[in-house]
Amino acid sequence: MSHPYQFNRAISRRPGASVVKGLRAGGGPDPSLEGVLAEHAAYVAALEAAGLAVTLLDPLEDFPDAIFVEDPALVFPDCAILLNPGTESRAGEGAFLRPTLAAMFETVLDLPEGHADGGDVLAMDGAVYIGLSARTDRTGAEALARLLEGTGRKAVVAETPPSVLHLKTASSIVDEETILATRELAASGVYKGYRVLEIPAGEEAGANVLRVNDTILAGSRFPRILDLLDGHGAKVVCLENSEIEKIDAGFTCMSLRWFGG
C-alpha cells in the first residue's frame, strides 16, 4: 500500500538573487541571500538523504518566489497539474515548469479557471484537501476539485480560518492517519476523522513540516513541535529555516514530490 508521503523523485529550483524580495504577508526584513542559499541547499540534501532523486532547476530572476515550485503546480504518480497562483507576480511561473513536467509526466493538466496555489492543497490517502484562502478562490478550488475527481481522486474544498495564508502554512501530514495543525485550524473541523496533533501556542510558525518516506523535515527553532513529533514516534530531521521563513515559506513549498518509475 502506498502512502501520501512515499516519494522517490522531486523537482526543486535554485533560488535567484531576487529571492530576497519575495512575497510576505506581514512585512518584515528581507532575508539574507546567503542564508536562503544555505537553507535551500540543506533542504535539497535532506530530500536526497531521504531517498529522493532531485531534479534541480535553474533560478528565475524575474520571479522572486520561483523557488516555491509547489505553488504553481501539483504532481501525482500519474499526472501533473499546472495551477494559477493567486498573486499576479507569480502568474508566469507555470510556463517555466511546463517543459520539465511534460518531460516527466505522461499527462499534464491545466487549471481551467480561477486561482489556486499548491500551498493550499494537502493530499491524504482518502482525499485531497483544497483550502480556500487569499491565494485560492472558490472558483479555482472547485475547478481543481473537478480535475482531481477526473483522475479518480476524492477532493474536499475546505473553509479555513481567515488568518491562514495557505492550508499548509497551518497544517502538515505526519502519517496517513495524523495531521499536525494549528489550534485554530484544528478547531475549524477541516480534518474531522483524522488524528490531529495541535501545535503548542507560540509555535504556529512551525506548522509546515514535510514528511518524506520515514523522515519528517521540521524547523529547528520550534522545540515544542519537535517534542510533539518525537512523542508521536516520528523520525525528525531538524533544518534551519529562519531566512526562508521571512518570505512566508516552509518545507513543503520548495519541492514537487512524487513516486515515479
Image: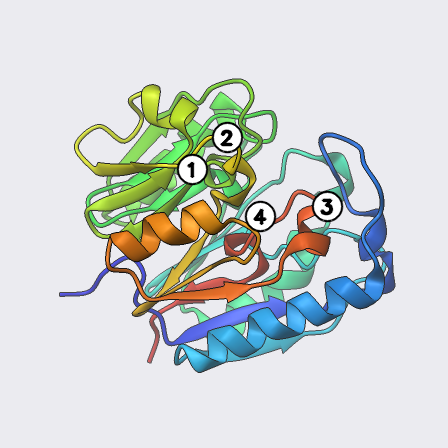
Nearer the N terminus, badge 3 or badge 4? 4
Residue neighbourhood size for the residue with mark 4, other residues' Cα within 10 Å, grouped as few (<14), some (14–19), many (≥20) = many
Provide the secondary structure element on which disc 3 rests.
loop
Which mark is in front, 3 or 4? 3
The tag earlier along the polypeptide, 1 or 3, is: 1
Q: Which residue is mark 2?
A: 140
Calculate the distance from the C-alpha at mark 2 to the C-alpha at mark 1.
6 Å
Confirm whether residue 111 shows in the render. Answer: no
Disc 4 is placed on an element classified as loop
x then y, percent, for residue 56: 62, 76
Circles 2 and 1: CB distance less than 8 Å? yes
Secondary structure at badge 1 equals: helix
Identify the residue under disc 4. 71
Residue at mark 3 to residue at mark 2: CA–CA distance: 27 Å
Q: Earlier in the sequence, mark 4 or mark 2?
A: 4
Q: Earlier in the sequence, mark 1 or mark 4?
A: 4
The answer to whether residue 246 is above or below residue 165 is below
Residue 71 in sight: yes
The local crowd at label 2, few if under 14, some if 14 to 19, many if 20 or more residues have their Cα within 10 Å, is many
Which residue does the numbered mark 3 point to in the structure image? 246
Q: Which residue is mark 1?
A: 144
92 relative to 17, above or below: above
